[in-house]
Amino acid sequence: MTDLTTSVQKLLDKDKTVVNENANKDATVFNTQRDLTAGAVAKSYALKYMLPKHVANAHLKGDIHFHDLDYSPYHAMTNCCLIDIAGMLANGFTIGNANVESPKSIQTATAQIAQIIANVASSQYGGCSVDRIDEILATYAKRNYEKHEEEAEKWVLAERRVEFARERTRKDIYDAMQSLEYEINTLYTSNGQTPFVTLGFGLGEDWFAREIQMAILKVRLGGIGKDKQTAIFPKLVFSIKRGTNLEATDPNYDIKQLALECSAKRMYPDVLNYDSLVRLAGDFKVPMGCRSFLPAWKDADGEFVNAGRNNLGVVTLNVPRIAIQSGGDKERFWEIFTERMQTVKDALLFRLERVREAKPENAPILYKYGAFGKRLDDGQDVDQLFNKERSTISIGYIGLYEAATMFYGGEWEANPEAKEFTLDILKELKEYADAWKAEYGYWFSVYSTPSESLTDRFNRLDRAKYGDIKDITDKEYYQNSFHYDVRKKVTPFEKLDFEMEYPEYCSGGFIHYCEYPKLTHNLKALEAVWDYAYDRVAYLGTNTPIDRCYECDFEGEFAPTAEGFKCPECGNTNPETADVVKRTCGYLGNPMKRPMVHGRHEEITQRVKHLESPNE
């Protein structure tokens, strides 16, 4: 779709494939409508005048997907990043007309973080993450403690001074983390949405870091607003490490118990398993946004660096279409695959060429004031922040399940030959990525695309072209990445065993999920899965029913309808008197307030539980 008039008319007509493409955008409000209109212009212009013709054509046909065309390449914007929050807080920064100094308290530090997040999110199009926020903020919480110590020396008996200072600091920490949660959820960026933010925490072991971890979890458990609704942002990622919090003898095991309670009630935090991630990525870090991982990388001084690095964009390959077009002929499959990968390469090289054209003055918060880890002057070359493999740029993929189904039928998971075929696809993608990295000096990675709306788009295009094909196009969605077919009943342990081999070949982005019944009174069952996962997979999300109806007080799982969801007890479909939270991709969404595309809705309704409910 390159015709601008048609694009804008679809917005005016509230075409669901357009207004529901991003479940985080409320298309009923003016600022989002303006962003969607600007995005339609940028997308139309890029497809017609900027992208190489064969790349634009491949995108329009659905052979590939050039992501985020509403922002890039019209603007020389980058995708997602790990913000160098520690450096920005320590050294100060500038936003607008304000020169901001290093904070003297945790309350000021979290207020500054909220402002940084808002500005970073407005200067790129992908998610932004704050890694190890508990350890970063511990420095500023200690300053609060020292102030309270001084107060105690004046007014409190000697034997109560430590207790006094700790109690006051504990309250400061809780208030600061609560303020950060509320500020993030009330922010609107220039992108017309709440920032896609991820907070990583869990490894700090001193008193201050522990209190910050507990405050993050307690704030999330408490909910937002008078109805105590589940906060959609920030995404919380809790780090689990043997010797820190994994086992009952570890010093932070009590915080793991709080994380389990929070995950069962609020679906976050997801968990990062330290040892498994280090094996895959070379060192430890939180994902950028929902699932994009940086590889281990050393600077010129030989120091490992993660904070301030980023991703330059994604182009996703429609793997099911290649399988369909091959007609079940493996040799033909690989021939088409090779042809498509040349188009993917050209698309990614164009992305690289475009982002290198940015100037520091285009996004001062990123390039001049430290979010990307260095501080450049106006006119300096931004490529120094991308090249020498500092940044990643990603080959995305979708639908390994459907690709194998074309050759082996829809029940192929127990067939070793079929599974090896799906692994071969990822191995081939990784071989291309490694070859391009060696050739161009940028870290090409293989990325398990979240496919929030792409699951719908690719399937819709293929269904229109090839008709209903059993277990492939007839579902009206494609399975995400390497995930086990969501319709099939397996245990969490079987699912993780099946999926654990794949991330080795797509370590640029991945996540595993397990589906559960209500678990608030069965935390040991959830812990059993987390513990089983620790040495097997690096990144695990918890999907559990946490919907609430404020008309009849039902808590559990709303029933799917053709248009959305309804309370199974009273039939309530009013988004003002219900809180429905679903995992749309790596992030959570509230589909009653901000509907999702049809294909993702279908996929969610097909998901089966991997654990039995205690009542079953």
Image: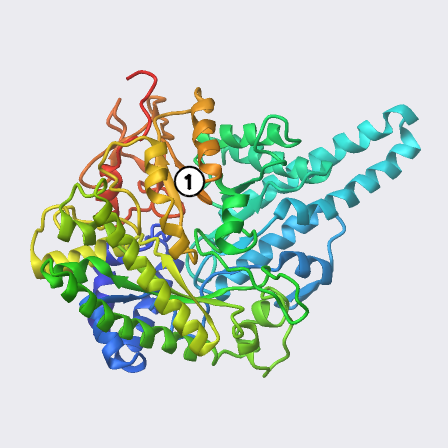
Q: How is the image coloured?
A: rainbow
- Where is the C terminus found, in terms of image quarters? top left
Q: Amino acid at mark 1?
A: Gly
Q: Nearer the viewer, residue 494 or 89?
A: 494
The mark total stands at 1
| Other residues around mark 1 within 10 Å, as few (<14) / some (14–19) / many (≥20) | many
Residue 226 as seen in the image, left or right of residue 45:
right
Q: Who's the residue at 66% across and 42% down the image?
A: 204
Q: Is residue 9 visible?
A: yes
> In which quadrant of the rendered view does residue 244 lie?
top right
Q: Position of residue 594 (x, y in %)?
A: 33, 46
Residue assigned mark 1? 541
- Where is the N terminus found, in terms of image quarters? bottom left
In the picture as drawn, the residue positioned furthest to the front comes out as 417
Residue 291 as seen in the image, left or right of residue 253:
left
> In which quadrant of the rendered view does residue 167 lie?
top right
Q: Who's the residue at 17% across and 61% down the image?
A: 321
In the picture as drawn, the residue positioned furthest to the top comes out as 615
> In which quadrant of the rendered view does residue 266 lie?
top left
Q: Is residue 268 visible?
A: no
Q: Nearer the viewer, residue 23 or 466?
A: 466
Taking 4 as reference, is 616 above or below it?
above
Q: Who's the residue at 55% across and 77% down the image?
A: 382
Q: Position of residue 267 (x, y in %)?
A: 43, 35
Q: Nearer the viewer, residue 49 or 61?
A: 61
Q: Position of residue 50 (x, y in %)?
A: 32, 81
Q: Who's the residue at 13% across and 59% down the image?
A: 324
Q: Element under label 1?
A: strand
In the picture as drawn, the residue positioned furthest to the left comes out as 467
Taking 244 as reference, is 469 above or below it?
below
Q: Position of residue 585 (x, y in %)?
A: 35, 48
Residue 121 as seen in the image, left or right of residue 116:
left
